[in-house]
């Protein structure tokens, strides 16, 4: 009996001794609680002992408001510390054009609690715009003013006057990423051009991160403009296009944002296109001689009207990497190497005022792979088609791949050769029964730098670009960085199939270019000056080995895939420095 009582006491003692140890073990393994969040906004020029011009610039620059940064964070005081939330918040901040650097880190100074610091650096966002693009058959100039961080609240306002290949326009854009400090985004754009007008409005609540569970959008676009078809770099046919495009979508996201996210969208699309032959005044408005283009009415596309519901699904497998010296010198850029899949099915029946009963199908899949700590490859396939009374039409297929290798600093013995990045892009486009108002273009502005702009046209296109981008001098005078590139381009466009293009109609060039980056300016714009030598006489009159000079902004190709284009329609406005 005594031994039994002793046994019971022993069990009770072991229970009370082990319980606090177990509870302590669980507490120690659980993530700490966020006790405080500190926002640190660094000035455009944040170095010590600055001279008068930099101090003056800092004084004149209205800093980003702390609430603008805080509202983008995916965590708050009292939450359990989650590393993925911190990383996703960093990625959100890096998408803001007025932020140069974004770093979020935590410190655990007391057991069970953590203090989080969010450090960002402002960029200079108010600029008089002097945009220009010249050479290889392209001529564009513009002047205006823009601010991508209006009064420090993260809003964008742009006013621009532009002359683009004979067409004059006055462009106005207002983009409010957080309307009335809410989750809504408002975009208003108006383009008054010599040949007509274009207006864009978009209101909605977009997906800003993988944690967002719901989104919606209403887009409207209306224009009445002269459109052009090209041959050998010159207009071959022009026509007037009146369009009304309305898109409404409501989305819902499910799944674990750290592993797999599904975004379902139900919506309605309305699109109406009317085509007509140009008047004599239209030729004058776009600076085209009527005698230089075809007057064949058979080239005019048929009027189209589609109206009906759609359903789409997007699958996102997050697997992000962050690298610099990819497309924008020292700016960090984020890339998802995980699989992304997109499907869209739309119906446009006659009883909803479509011209004919029509089925729309669209889809894409993309994926990447990390080859080393500084190199990766990404690829994607996308396709779309339309099925109506006469069968399939306007069917397109694209295959593309990107390879980047940020190799770092290279030296020849002890001679500094710069920080090098190997970059390459390949795209293959082909189509079936493409609408008459559409064509694939290829030339100086989008791949073949040794030939005039829009020299090659057709229903199919192939282009391969290779570049060795080198970055020589960083932050010269705290204003710009200097680098360059050796490049090789090869490709073609034709109404023949891609295999015929590869075997008979390939054109190529190689050359060297200068790159001037503005790291403390919004978006980290890059000025590109390329000198290209073609290896073959071109249909635009280009002679073999005759150099072509092109001056413009932006890389000729980037690390982005077509499937990553913004789902919400954005106004296209040319930006300068």
Image (tube, rainbow, N blue to C red):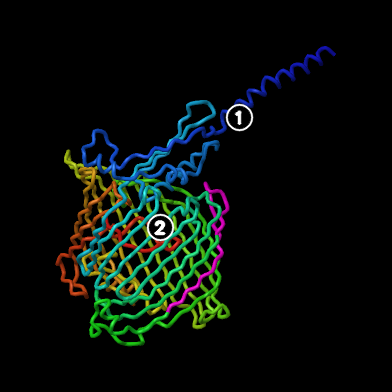
Which label belongs to residue 26?
1
Magenta segment: does it hold 254? yes
Question: Residue 309 location, x and y as percent?
Answer: 56, 70
User: Could you tell me which residue is drawn at 27 percent across and 81 percent down?
Assistant: 283
- Mark 2 sits on what residue? 175
Q: Magenta part of the protein: which range? A: 251-273
Task: Determine the image quadrant of residue 459.
Answer: bottom left
> For the C terminus, which image quadrant?
bottom left
Residue 154 in picture, x, y percent from top left = 40, 50
Within the image, what quadrant is residue 410 found in? top left
Q: Is residue 289 left or right of residue 398?
A: left
Residue 461 x %, y %: 33, 70
For label 1, the crowd category at 10 Å Cα-Cα, with few meaning under 14, some 14 to 19 and many 20 or more, is few
Mark 1–mark 2 distance (CA, rounded to whole Å): 48 Å
Nearer to the camera, 126 or 503 = 126
The crowding category of the residue bearing disc 2, from other C-alpha atoms within 10 Å (few below 14, some 14 to 19, many at least 20), is many
Residue ID at (63%, 23%): 21
Q: Give left or right: position of 439 versus 54.
A: right
Mark 2 secondary-structure assignment: strand
Q: Main secondary structure of the magenta part?
A: strand
Using the image as rendered, state which of residue 475 and residue 381 is in the foreground. Answer: 475
Residue at x 31%, y 45% (from the top left corner): 61
Whether residue 65 is visible, yes or no, is yes
């Amino acid at each position: 009996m005594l031994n039994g009582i002793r046994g019971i006491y022993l069990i009770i003692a072991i229970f009370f001794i082990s319980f606090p140890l177990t509870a302590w073990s669980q507490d120690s393994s659980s993530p700490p609680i966020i006790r405080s969040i500190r926002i640190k906004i660094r000035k455009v020029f944040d170095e010590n002992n600055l001279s008068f011009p930099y101090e003056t610039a800092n004084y004149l620059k209205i800093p980003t408001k702390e609430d603008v940064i805080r509202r983008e964070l995916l965590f708050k005081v009292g939450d359990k510390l989650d590393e993925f939330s911190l990383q996703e918040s960093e990625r959100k901040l890096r998408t803001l054009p007025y932020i140069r650097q974004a770093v979020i880190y935590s410190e655990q100074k007391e057991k069970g609690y953590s203090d989080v610091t969010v450090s960002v650096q402002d960029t200079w966002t108010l600029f008089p715009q002097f945009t220009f693009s010249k050479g290889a058959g392209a001529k564009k100039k513009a002047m205006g003013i823009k601010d991508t961080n209006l009064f420090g609240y993260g809003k964008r306002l742009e006013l621009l006057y532009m002359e683009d290949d004979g067409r004059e326009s006055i462009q106005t854009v207002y983009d409010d990423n957080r309307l009335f400090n809410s989750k809504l985004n408002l975009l208003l754009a108006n383009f008054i051009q010599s040949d007509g007008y274009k207006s864009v409005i978009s209101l909605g609540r977009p997906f800003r991160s993988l944690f967002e569970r719901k989104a919606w959008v209403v887009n409207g676009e209306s224009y009445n403009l002269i459109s052009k078809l090209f041959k050998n770099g010159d207009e071959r046919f022009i026509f007037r296009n009146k369009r009304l495009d309305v898109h409404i979508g409501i989305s819902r996201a499910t799944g674990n944002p750290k592993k797999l996210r599904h975004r379902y969208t139900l919506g309605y699309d309305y699109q109406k296109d009317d085509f007509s032959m140009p008047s004599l005044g239209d030729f004058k408005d776009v600076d085209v001689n009527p005698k230089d283009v075809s007057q064949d009415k058979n080239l005019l596309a048929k009027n189209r009207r589609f109206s009906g519901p759609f359903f789409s699904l997007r699958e996102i497998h997050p697997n992000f990497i962050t690298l610099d010296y990819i497309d924008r010198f020292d700016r960090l850029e984020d890339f998802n190497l995980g699989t992304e899949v997109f499907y869209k099915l739309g119906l446009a029946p006659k009883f909803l005022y479509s011209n004919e009963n029509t089925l729309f199908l669209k889809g894409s899949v993309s994926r990447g792979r990390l080859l080393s700590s500084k190199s990766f490859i990404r690829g994607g396939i996308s396709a779309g088609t339309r099925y109506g009374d006469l069968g399939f039409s306007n069917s397109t297929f694209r295959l593309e791949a990107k390879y980047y290798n940020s190799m770092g600093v290279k030296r020849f013995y002890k001679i500094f050769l710069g920080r090098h990045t190997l970059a390459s892009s390949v795209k293959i486009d082909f189509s079936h029964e493409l609408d008459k108002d559409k064509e694939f273009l290829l030339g100086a502005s989008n791949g073949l730098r040794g030939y005039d702009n829009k020299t090659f046209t057709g229903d199919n296109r192939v282009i391969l670009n290779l570049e060795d981008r080198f970055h020589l001098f960083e932050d010269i005078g705290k204003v710009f960085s200097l680098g360059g590139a050796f490049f090789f381009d090869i490709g073609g466009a034709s109404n023949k199939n891609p295999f015929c293009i590869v075997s008979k109609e390939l054109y190529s060039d190689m050359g060297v270019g200068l790159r001037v980056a503005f790291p403390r300016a919004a978006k980290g714009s890059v000025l590109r000056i390329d000198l290209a030598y073609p290896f073959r006489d071109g249909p635009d009159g280009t002679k073999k080995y005759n150099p072509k000079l092109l001056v413009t902004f932006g890389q000729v190709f980037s690390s982005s895939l077509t499937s990553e284009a913004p789902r919400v329609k954005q106004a296209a406005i040319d930006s300068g420095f």
